[in-house]
Image (spheres, rainbow, N blue to C red):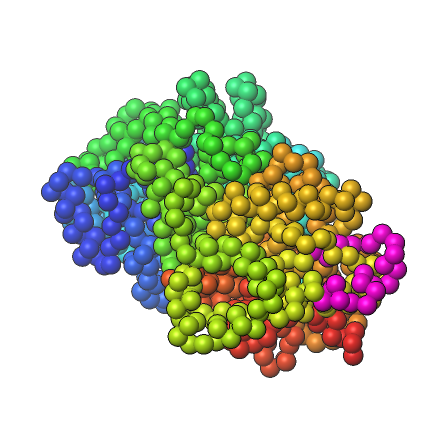
């Protein structure tokens, strides 16, 4: 699969290491008459990155920037080079590659050339074809060719074919900036100076396999300002877009309010244009942007100019995430590509959008257009029903009628992502049968056996064939979690992944991002959120993965999932792989013996309670330090031999609490202001955190109580997929917490992973128990409790820099806004790192995970400490796993924010 509606099962996937491997793969395919499909990051939305036969994965090894010449402003790249890597290499010279699709952090140059990709800056720098100097390709015969301006490198007969149909080529192509559909044969007209490289761009791997490209770089503006113009509605924004082009913008991007999850700092309006302006300095860029804003003032309802780079990045993320956000309608129902990127002349965009909306209404469909309004190109996801025969029939009828509307407005069926399977069948409506016949003859010259990406562009497969949903079960699968956002349907939850591959990045998407740490370590598609979701899709389909929940392929892919929940927040469509992993493990091991680590660490609350009850903590610690005994114990328990077993506290937090004079603190006779949750880690492993939290909460004037014994969030059972035990533990917890819930007392949870479990997993496992929702709503983090219950309290001033890492579950489920404000009040300056510490509860302790766990820590957490070391920072780590990882890998003691504040209070 790619990011489209289509699915094909290949016979093999080949990751060529060099050009010779490409030639060898082609030779084998020719010998056996097997199709071959070149593939980059698989973010194509029309299906052209899927195929039977051999799929050629160019991202694994053919991913080098061979050379970069800043004087000539060119770069030589292999097809698997990720766009952002090229841009980063060019940036020190003040250069960049102009085209920049929203998938710039993972899309490859080969894929961009294959689709003739564009991006938001095309109003300034054009399409990929406008930025290609020459290409080295291997055609379907296995012949290497170098393509540039002129006829050198052309297959025999191509020039004669063009010369015989010059009149057709001069009149058959609509003239608009985003005409991507079909073969660009008009680039071979003699009056333009034939350009074979340009003509090859957009051929979607059907004419040859790209092995190297020389691309042109452009001078990047020294400064940029972003004008965000608010309009009453989408039509008003569309009508205004073309009028802004004379001001020389770098972008004119449009989107409507129903694609925005929150205000996100946008000006007032029902739709917005994102207009970027360049300048020699920040002041000049701002002046140009303000001039444009004044010129547009008669049509806008509000406007905003941002020249701060961080502020611009935050606003651009709102726009770039639309490709994922649009896959869900406001009511949560699914929406799909298919008519993702048609384009019309910019001056006709307003009229086209009105006709488009009318056609949607006629068919009872919904969709929200957004995209490159300055180029007349829109993206849209539509709530097609692709699961039933009637829905698929309506999908076809709508596609045929919309093609007529696009052509009537002088447009192109594809304005960015190519035709693939989604639109190639409809190309005769745009070009007529004669020109489409010429496309077929051209294809035959390059690839006479028809082996290169068959079914795309010419002699296409039907647009409603090979739909990826066809083999999925139509009845809901029996599952343990409730999947409330997917109607209780596990298949719908898995379908959330639309393949935009934001999880497939070599570096985090932002300084605070988490997803997907295991992919960034291994580089393996199977270890990305998308790869795992696709394997679960195949498990449900039952055609390739045939043993269902018992699948070893799915188990192996999920094995390196850290359950960090980063995808829950960072994935544009909210895929929650940690939950899917717990679900899978629950079924996979049902009625079977589990790995030893599931008993050793999944049952951790039980073991620690036994140690506390028998007062054997010192003995356990001594045994854990005894070399041979410790090694044997770790081997039996499935624990990585490289790991030291954390010490158990001889005196638990609960014992300390019960032994306090006037337990409950000041005013203990009245109802408490807050319940302090004694999670397993705080109670048995870090009781100092609990004691510190009590000191701070009481210093803030709050009365605190601790719930009766035996409460547990079930985290360790959930993370190891022991969901029946988790339900039992949570049910008992609700029984014990009921009196406090009846009183409406906030519950302060110090361990972020436990707080996230209570706030999210609890209701998804016990959604039929109304007490679950009440407990989830009662949960507060330490900082949230102080802010809500003691808003006038001022923490002690510490006035030191802070370093460390925001807990991944805090980032993904809880949010850290209150923590940031509390740190600011206390004078703890600086940003905490994003990512995941890599220990991630049981993950980093399990045998076989140590190297991946360590690599995750070395990505962001450990470098952030090194960078801040000269400032002698306070090392903050609210999670027990994070503190343990810091201690074991760096010999650094991290502390919970409560401990830092309590120490300052003591001083």
Q: Residue at x 24, y 55 (%)?
A: 16
Residue 668 part of the magenta segment: yes
- Is residue 303 at least partly visible in the picture? no
553 or 435: nearer the eye? 553
Figure quadrant of the C terminus = bottom right
Q: Position of residue 641 (x, y in %)?
A: 40, 69
On the picture, is 412 further left or further right than 734? left
Q: Which residues are magenta?
A: 656-677
Q: Position of residue 757 (x, y in %)?
A: 60, 49
Q: Residue 268 occupies which quadrant of the picture?
A: top right
Residue extending farthest to the front is 614
274 or 149: nearer the eye? 274
Residue 751 part of the magenta segment: no
Q: Residue at x 33, y 54 (%)?
A: 59
456 or 891: nearer the eye? 891
- Is residue 459 at least partly visible in the picture? yes
Check the image and report above or below for 553 versus 232: below
Magenta segment's dominant SS is: loop
Q: Position of residue 681 (x, y in %)?
A: 60, 62
Q: Residue 589 occupies which quadrant of the picture?
A: top left
Q: Residue at x 55, y 20 (%)?
A: 364
86 or 720: nearer the eye? 720
Q: How many marks?
A: 0
Q: Residue at x 72, y 59 (%)?
A: 782
Figure quadrant of the N terminus = top left
On the picture, is 207 further left or further right than 775? left
On the picture, is 396 further left or further right than 486? left
Q: Position of residue 333 (x, y in %)?
A: 55, 31
């Amino acid at each position: 699969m790619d990011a489209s509606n289509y699915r094909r099962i290949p016979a093999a996937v080949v990751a060529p290491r060099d050009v010779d491997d490409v030639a060898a793969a082609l030779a084998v395919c020719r010998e056996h008459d097997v199709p071959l499909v070149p593939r980059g990051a698989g973010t194509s939305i029309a299906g052209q990155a899927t195929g039977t036969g051999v799929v050629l994965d160019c991202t694994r090894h053919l991913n080098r920037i061979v050379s970069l010449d800043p004087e000539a402003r060119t770069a030589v790249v292999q097809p698997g080079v990720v766009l952002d890597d090229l841009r980063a290499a060019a940036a020190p010279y003040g250069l960049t590659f102009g085209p920049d699709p929203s998938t710039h952090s993972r899309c490859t140059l080969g894929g961009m050339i294959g689709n003739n990709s564009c991006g938001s800056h095309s109003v300034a720098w054009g399409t990929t074809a406008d930025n290609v100097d020459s290409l080295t390709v291997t055609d379907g015969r296995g012949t290497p060719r170098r393509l540039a301006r002129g006829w050198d490198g052309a297959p025999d007969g191509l020039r004669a074919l063009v010369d015989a149909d010059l009149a057709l080529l001069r009149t058959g192509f609509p003239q608009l900036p985003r005409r991507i559909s079909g073969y660009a044969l008009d680039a071979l007209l003699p009056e333009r100076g034939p350009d074979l490289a340009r003509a090859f761009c957009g051929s979607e791997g059907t004419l040859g396999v790209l092995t190297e490209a020389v691309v042109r770089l452009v001078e990047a503006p020294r400064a940029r300002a972003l004008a965000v113009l608010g309009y009453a509605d989408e039509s008003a924004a569309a009508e205004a877009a073309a009028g802004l082009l004379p001001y020389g913008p770098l972008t004119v991007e449009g989107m409507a309010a129903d694609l925005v999850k929150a205000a996100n700092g946008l000006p007032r309006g029902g739709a917005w244009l994102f207009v970027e302006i360049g300048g020699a300095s920040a002041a000049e860029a701002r002046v140009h942007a303000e001039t444009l804003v004044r010129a547009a003032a008669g049509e806008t309802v509000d406007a905003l100019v941002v020249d701060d780079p961080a502020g611009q990045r935050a606003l651009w993320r709102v726009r770039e995430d639309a490709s994922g956000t649009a896959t869900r309608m406001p009511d949560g129902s699914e929406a799909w590509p298919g008519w993702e990127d048609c384009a019309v002349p910019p001056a006709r965009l307003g009229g086209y959008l009105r006709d488009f909306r009318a056609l949607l209404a006629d068919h009872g469909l919904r969709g929200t257009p957004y995209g490159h309004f300055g180029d007349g190109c829109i993206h849209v996801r539509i709530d097609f029903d692709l699961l039933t025969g009637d829905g698929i029939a309506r999908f076809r009828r709508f596609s045929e009628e919309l093609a007529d509307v696009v052509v009537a407005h002088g447009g192109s069926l594809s304005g960015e992502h190519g035709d693939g399977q989604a639109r190639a069948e409809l190309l005769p409506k745009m070009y007529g049968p004669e020109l489409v016949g010429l496309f077929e003859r051209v294809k035959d010259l390059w690839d006479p056996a028809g082996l290169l990406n068959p079914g795309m562009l010419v002699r296409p497969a039907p647009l409603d064939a090979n739909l990826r949903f066809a083999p999925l079960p139509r009845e809901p699968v029996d599952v343990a979690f409730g999947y409330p956002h997917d109607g209780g349907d596990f298949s719908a939850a898995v379908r959330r992944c639309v393949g935009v591959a934001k999880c497939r990045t070599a570096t985090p998407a932002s300084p605070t991002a988490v997803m997907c740490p295991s992919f960034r370590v291994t580089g393996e598609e199977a270890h990305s959120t998308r790869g795992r979701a696709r394997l679960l899709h195949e498990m449900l389909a039952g055609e390739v993965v045939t043993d269902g929940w018992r699948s070893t392929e799915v188990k192996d892919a999920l094995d390196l999932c850290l359950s960090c929940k980063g995808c829950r927040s960072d994935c544009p469509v909210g895929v929650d792989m940690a939950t899917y992993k717990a679900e899978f493990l629950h079924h996979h091991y049902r009625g079977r013996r589990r790995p030893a680590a599931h008993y050793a660490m999944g049952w951790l609350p039980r073991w620690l309670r036994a140690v506390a009850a028998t007062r054997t903590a010192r003995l356990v610690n001594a045994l854990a330090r005894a070399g041979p005994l410790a090694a044997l114990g770790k081997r039996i328990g499935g624990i990585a031999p490289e790991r030291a077993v954390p010490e158990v506290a001889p005196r638990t937090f609960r014992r300390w609490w019960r032994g306090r004079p006037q337990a409950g603190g000041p005013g203990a006779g009245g109802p408490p202001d807050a319940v302090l949750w004694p999670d397993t880690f705080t109670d048995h492993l870090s009781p100092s955190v609990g004691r510190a939290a009590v000191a701070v909460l009481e210093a803030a004037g709050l009365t605190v109580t601790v719930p009766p014994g035996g409460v547990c969030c079930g985290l360790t059972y959930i993370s190891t997929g022991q969901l029946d035990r988790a339900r039992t533990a949570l049910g008992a917890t609700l029984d014990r917490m009921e009196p406090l819930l009846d009183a409406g007392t906030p519950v302060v949870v110090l361990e972020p992973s436990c707080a996230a479990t209570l706030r999210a997993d609890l209701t998804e496992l016990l959604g039929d128990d109304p007490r679950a929702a009440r407990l989830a709503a009662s949960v507060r983090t330490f900082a949230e409790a102080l802010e809500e219950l003691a808003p006038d309290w001022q923490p002690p001033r510490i006035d030191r820099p802070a370093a460390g890492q925001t807990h991944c579950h805090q980032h993904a489920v809880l949010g850290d806004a209150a923590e940031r404000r509390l740190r600011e009040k206390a004078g703890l300056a600086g940003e905490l790192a994003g990512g995941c510490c890599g220990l991630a509860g049981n993950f980093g302790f399990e045998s076989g995970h140590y190297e991946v766990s360590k690599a995750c820590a070395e990505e962001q957490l450990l470098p952030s400490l090194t960078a801040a070391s000269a400032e002698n920072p306070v090392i903050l780590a609210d999670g027990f796993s994070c503190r343990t990882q810091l201690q074991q890998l760096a010999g650094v003691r991290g502390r919970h924010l409560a401990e830092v504040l309590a120490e300052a209070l003591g001083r």
